[in-house]
Image: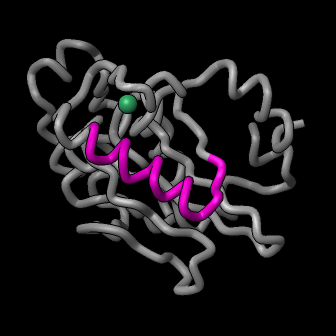
Amino acid sequence: MQLKKLGYKMSDVVAVITSHSHLDHMGNVEMFPNALHILQKRELYQAWWPEKFQRSSGAHIMADYDDARDFNYFALDGDLDVFGDGSITVLDAPGHTLGNSSLKLKFANGDTFVIAQDALWMRENLEGYPAGLNYSVKAYFETADRLKYMSDLENAELFFGHDEQQWKEKGNRWYK
Ligand SMILES: [Zn+2]
């Protein structure tokens, strides 16, 4: 839907960066059978054998991605500067899941954004209140610190994965 608004077809997408394997982030992955799929290798382990609490919570729906097993994966073990110019960097940001990733985007006009995805659900997570459903609370806090310091040092705006207030304030800038 959003791609269509921007004038693209599904088949125009050559690469898909997936933060993690929860249903609301990976649910449509099978719509991109010809793309290169970039994510942490640990997240593939997470997707294929989630912990019992993740399974019983309904956070993983394997039927959403079981036909994607033989897609073309670039399985990471850490950060990746996708184009080698710092414009798109996949950040290893575990805690929410075993291999969650966040993103740093640098635009030509100098604007920098850190897209936390579910590493931080909402602003209150920066203030010592962890989001729920974490693979590791320790890794979660280490990642939260990393993203906060990165956004402070690089004067980057930090975007949260599920912050309704921020979405209302900022989301319309991109999605008209
Ligand atoms: Zn999630």
Residue 136 visible? The answer is: yes
Quarter of the image where the C terminus is located: top right
Image position of 116 with respect to 113: above or below: above
Question: In the rendering, at what x and y percent does residue 2 appear?
Answer: 76, 41
Q: Residue at x 79, y 27 (%)?
A: 169
Image position of 171 with respect to 52: above or below: below
Q: Residue at x 45, y 45 (%)?
A: 30
Q: Is residue 162 magenta?
A: no
Near-viewer residue (108 or 10): 108
Question: In the rendering, at what x and y percent does residue 118 appear?
Answer: 42, 35
Q: Quadrant of ligand 1?
A: top left
Farthest residue to the bottom: give it: 84
Q: Residue at x 50, y 76 (%)?
A: 82
Residue 47 visible? The answer is: no
Question: In the rendering, at what x and y percent does residue 77 appear?
Answer: 23, 68
Would residue 168 be found to the left or right of residue 52 on screen?
right
The main secondary structure of the magenta stretch is helix
Quarter of the image where the N terminus is located: top right
> Image quadrant of residue 141?
top left
Q: Is residue 145 magenta?
A: yes
Question: In the rendering, at what x and y percent does residue 60 appear?
Answer: 28, 27
Near-viewer residue (10 or 39): 39
Residue segment shown in magenta: 141-157
Farthest residue to the right: give it: 176
Q: Residue at x 59, y 85 (%)?
A: 85
- What color scheme is it? one colour
Image position of 86 with respect to 95: above or below: below
Near-viewer residue (67 or 104): 104
